[in-house]
Each structure stands twice: as C-alpha cells, then as structure tokens.
Amino acid sequence: MQVIKDSQIIDDNWQSLADDAEVAAGDISVSLSRWQQDKAQLLAHDGKLGIRISPADNVADIAGDLDKIALVELDFPDFADGRLFSHAWLLRNRYGFQGEIRATGQYMPDQVFYLSRVGVNGFKPGNTERLPVELGYLHDFTVTYQASVN
Amino acid sequence: MYQYNEIDQTLVNERVAQFRRQTEKYLQGELDADQFRALRLRNGLYIQTHAPMLRVAIPYGLLSSVQVRKLAHIARTYDKNYCHFTTRQNVQYNWPKLEQVPDILAELATVQMHAIQTSGNCMRNTTSDHLAGVAVDELEDPRPYCEIIRQWTTLHPEFDYLPRKFKIAVSGAAHDRAATQFHDIGVHLVKNDAGEIGFRILVGGGLGRTPIIGQVIRPFLEKKDLLSYLEAILRIYNLFGRRDNKYKARIKILVKETGLEAFTEMVEAEWARIKDGMELSAAHIEAIKGHFSLPAYETEAAADLTFGQHLQDNTAFAKWYKYNTVSHKIPGYRAVFLSLKAPEVPPGDITDTQLDAVADLADVYSFGELRTTHRQNLIFSDVKQADLFGLWQQLVELQLATPNIGTVTDMICCPGLDFCSLANAGSIGIAKEINDALDDMDYLHDIGDVKINMSGCMNGCAHQSVGHIGILGVDKKGTEWYQLTLGGSSENEAAIGERLGPAVAKTDITQAVTTILSVYVKQRLEDESFLDMVKRVGIDPFKEQVYASH
C-alpha cells in the first residue's frame, strides 16, 4: 500500500486495527476509544502507534499522549465535515504534535491543499490511482492570505 | 478603492485554473456530482430551474467603472444581456453555460473580480454600509476593515467546510445601513470611554427560516485583535455548530442552544489562546486604509448656484433629488442612488447597455466608482451638486431615475419561482403587480418610507422577515400563496415582522398590500411613519381590513 507523506509517494506499513481486533506487532492505528480503553497494552506492543480521530472527537483528549504516538489519522466520514480541519490545526498549533497527521476516508482530492495548510502531511486516498493526482493538487496555489502552520 | 497586488492577482488566477480543472473533470465524468456541487458552489455556481446561476462577488459593494464594463461584457457575451444585483451587494447571472463558467471567471480575474465563496457552507462576501466613507454619521470608514476581512476569509483553509454559510457585515456609522444585527457576525466601529476607536462585535444574528437578532459578544475589541477574534468565533462554530440538521446549523442556533454567556466564554477562552502573535500591525491597517483615501474633492463645490435654480424650476428634478440623493460629508456633494426599481423591470435587474452607460457616467461624475446597496440599487457616492441636474437628465434617459428610493416600490425581491429551484412561489410577477397598482408617484411619496421585502420561499433571500411589510411565498398543494408580516426592520431598531394572519392567495396579494397602505394613510398620526404606526397600533387594524372581504 502506498500513501503520500511529506509531498512524496511512499510505501506504507501502518495497519488500521479494528476495535475488536487483537493487538498485533507492527505499526498500528486505533480509534480514540480503543486508545483510552487499552492504552497500557497498546504502549507495550512492538511497533509504532497511531490514533484515528473522527469529527466528533475532542483532540484535547489526546493532547497529553501525543509524545507517545507517531500518527494521527483524520478519518473523514464525509468530505463536508470540516471539523477535522480544526482538529488538524489544533494538533499542530496548540498541542505541538510533530508526528504524521494523515487524511483518510472520504476527503476530496480537491481538499488536499487546504488540508496541507492546517498541518496534514499524509494522505491515504481510498484508491491509490489518486496518489499522483493529489500530489499535484497540493500545489493548487502558490500564494495565500493567512499564516500557514507549516 | 482596493487595488490588487501580485499576490491577490495570482491567487485569483490560480483559483480560475483550479475551477477550470474541476469543471473539465466533472464534464468528463471524473468528478462526481456531489463533490462538484461543493466545489462549484464555492465558486458561486448554482444549478437552477432553467440554467446555472453564477453569483459574482462585489466585495463590500464597491465597483470601478472598468469592472462595471466587464460585467456588461459578460452579460452580453455569456448571458441574456442583463444581470441581477442581490441583497448582499453581489451580482448574479441567470443564464450562463456551465462549460463557459471558467471563461467567465477568467474574464472577471482580468479586472480583479471573482466569484470565490459567494455560496456554499463557507465564509461569504463581507458586506458593508453603501455610504461608507461619505456618510455624515460615520465614525470611521469601515471599508479598510472589510478588505482585511475579505483577505482573511478568502480561501481560509480551516473554515471552508463549515456547518452552514457564514456572513459578516461591517458598519462604521451611527445608522446601521448594513443590517449588521442580522449577520452571523456583525462588526460595528465604536469609540470607547478612553476615546479609542475599536469594534463592537455581534454574533448569532440571521434571517432565513429562523430570524434572530444578533447579540453583543464583545462590547469593545481593539483594532489589532480583529482577525484573532473572528478566528476564535469561527473555530468554536466549526467545531461545535450542529451538522445533523441543515436548518439548525447556522451559528445563531449554536448561540441560542448554548446560551450567549456560555458561548461567549468558549470564544473568549479560545481567543485568549491565539490572540498574541495574531495582531494586526498599525502599519498594515494604515497601508490598507491608504487604498481608501479620499478622492480629490473640489473645495468650492458648495458655491455652485445653478443647482438651486434647477431645484426651483423643475419639480421632477426636485422630487428625484429629494428621494434619490442623500447628504455627503463634503459640502457641495451628494450621494446619488440609481434606482433599479423601475416599474417594468424586475427589482435589481440591469441591462448590459445600462451598465456600460453607468460606467461612463461614473467616470464623468463620480471618480470612476460605483456601489451596490443591500436594497438592490446602485450609488454614485461622490457627485458635485453642480452636476446633479445633468446627471439626472441622463439617468432619466437610462430609466435609472425612478424617484422611489425608500418608498413602497423600492422593493427587495428574490428571483422567485421564475428562476430559482428552491422557490415555492413567484416574486417578480407580484412585484410588477404591486408596482402597477401603485403607479401614482404622489401617493407613493405621501406614504413615504415603507420597505417591502418579498421572498419566494422560506430561505428568505429577500429578507422578508425584516421588511416593514414582509411577503413570503409558500406552496399550498401546488398553488402559490403569500404570508404577510408587518413591522420588521433591519436597521438600528432591529425587529422581526409579526405575522398578519393566514396566507393570502396569489390573486389577492396585491390587494392586501394596497389595503395595508390605505389603513396606514387613514389612521396615521401626523408625520408618523409606517413602522411607528405599526408599533403604536399593532397589527389588528391592518388584519381587520385585509381579511374583511374573505
């Protein structure tokens, strides 16, 4: 599987762990509720950790854990749900998250420029054919009016 | 007025290229209709009953003559030789072809115009007082702050997918001509006890299905904090505004359900965390103000004597002067309204030929600038009194001098069922009927200040709930009916109109309006305005007469 990270198409080994799945070795991402429930077990596992955030989640809930994780996935149920844009901004600016913030799910290729400007640096489209397209769309604009997080 | 620099121009050009790509992908079947809908709306493009409708932004209602000629050219080349000015100071084309819209946007970009964020659930065009910079009751010109907000809202990466549309209006005058109490955020320039000028910030106002008057969230905000405060409000709204029901998704519902006090606490807490480092520098504010410096007014303009003579000699000119011009902060100058409410024309509509002529007149008489008003008229803001008579004669020729500004026939009207896919009922036809019934100018002038606002559906694009007389089109089993409200106002004494009674059939609506007016004429006290009378007597005397024959 390939994804975009830091404006490059790279191979990706992150596994998305379902809430009822056994913890396995390797780099895994879990939902916020799974994280809150099984934090100790997850921290003890062999591999990097990521947390999947949905629009209704409150990122302040993981602010204290950001040094323990390498990835936050913003899981778009619908491209029109703009809360994830604020979540990304908060993670980068307020909580100083240094790891990867990755858009997944039903975001639109035409949204990657805005996403990159609020701190998203990873993109995992449903279809890998979209990767080169999204890579190009990251450069839709060469100028902006607002301060960027990057 | 504001002139684009290289950054502004590049941004708009790149937006055109982006939308051209999106349109091509859609037409090739590579972009699904839902996604394209979200993208085209953010470029002002609706799909309407008959054809797409393109809404072009006119930031805070200010246009140059060059831009006006471009609007004329677009009407001629891509549309049916006319366009329509809206209640939010923008302009709409009703008949563009989808595949030509990128070309239209490219044409607009050549004159520093665009259609960015004129629809969709994002921050819309910032509106303002149509007399900004020339009003006698002005504390400070609001336009530099409008421009600062325009830039900040344009392509804001975090706030382009809000729960619902978001509208900001700015006023710098004692009299609120920008309906700021009915915007998601209203910004008033005010002076504090220390004599400093800053902003009073209102939040949660709005029209539409649930009209609500905005409330003060911060009585005084220093100028340097304008953008950080807006950002705090927008972030709270983006995170907590309802997304489960589009009719409850505006910020007014969030404020109402959270309570003003709790909502204010959330905003203030957010603001406290971001304000340091986001300050507008005094130098930046001054630089933007520099774009709105005063034109080269003649110092002796008031010395002209011909104007007074014309007023005495020509009653038609005198009437026009009384109704269609207003005072100006510079002696010897007037601001002149161009009425887009001629009897035979849908309110707010103008032809390509008229636009070209208006551009020429702007160059001759008003420093090459034109304004749009939220009541769908145009303004030359800086006309010397010596020029008024000559200008009037030319406006008469152009059918832009109907002396009805502020009268009953100066109606606000949405496109209605004739053009809009949302509408339940026609509005343009009713406007014409009312016009025909009230063709006696002396009677209109006797009635005086009565604002009729008429919308073809609950979405309320024509702000019927704040009309002195509001008319709302409703659908009853496939036929068009109209609900009447009385006593609304979008100005300082903001009020939401009270419903008169059951909806009235299409065949009876004009009669109902003329009946309301005759009740006013019969029962008013000396010099009492319509609105004052409604406040004094309530709706019952009107109700009795309107429903008497039913």
Image: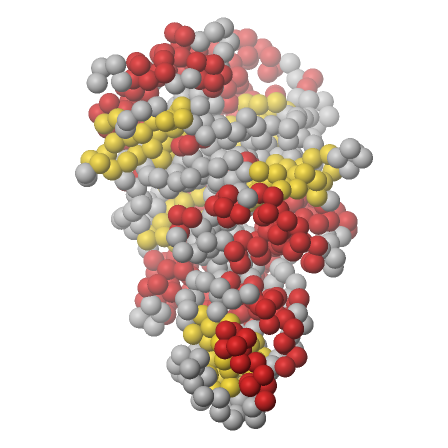
Kindly indicate the quadrant of the structure image that contains residue A97: bottom right
Q: Nearer the viewer, residue A86 or B451?
A: A86
**Residue B358 pos. (x, y %):** 48, 35
Report the residue that reaches farthest toward the right.
B194
- Residue B96 position (above or below residue B507): below
**Residue B105 pos. (x, y %):** 45, 56
**Residue B433 in view:** no
- The number of numbered badges drawn on the structure is 0
For the C terminus of chain B, which image quadrant? top left
The reply, left or right, for residue B230 in relation to residue B436 is: right
| Colour treatment of the image | secondary structure
Q: Nearer the viewer, residue A135 or A104?
A: A104
Kindly indicate the quadrant of the structure image that contains residue A145: bottom right
**Residue beneath the point at 68% across and 26% down:** B330
- Residue B18 position (above or below residue A44): above
For the N terminus of chain B, which image quadrant? top right
**Residue beneath the point at 66% across and 50% down:** B268
The reply, left or right, for residue B352 in relation to residue B417 is: right
**Residue B202 pos. (x, y %):** 59, 40
**Residue B154 pos. (x, y %):** 56, 56
**Residue beneath the point at 57% across and 38% down:** B215
**Residue B457 in view:** yes
**Residue beneath the point at 47% across and 32% down:** B375
Q: Nearer the viewer, residue A5 or B401?
A: A5
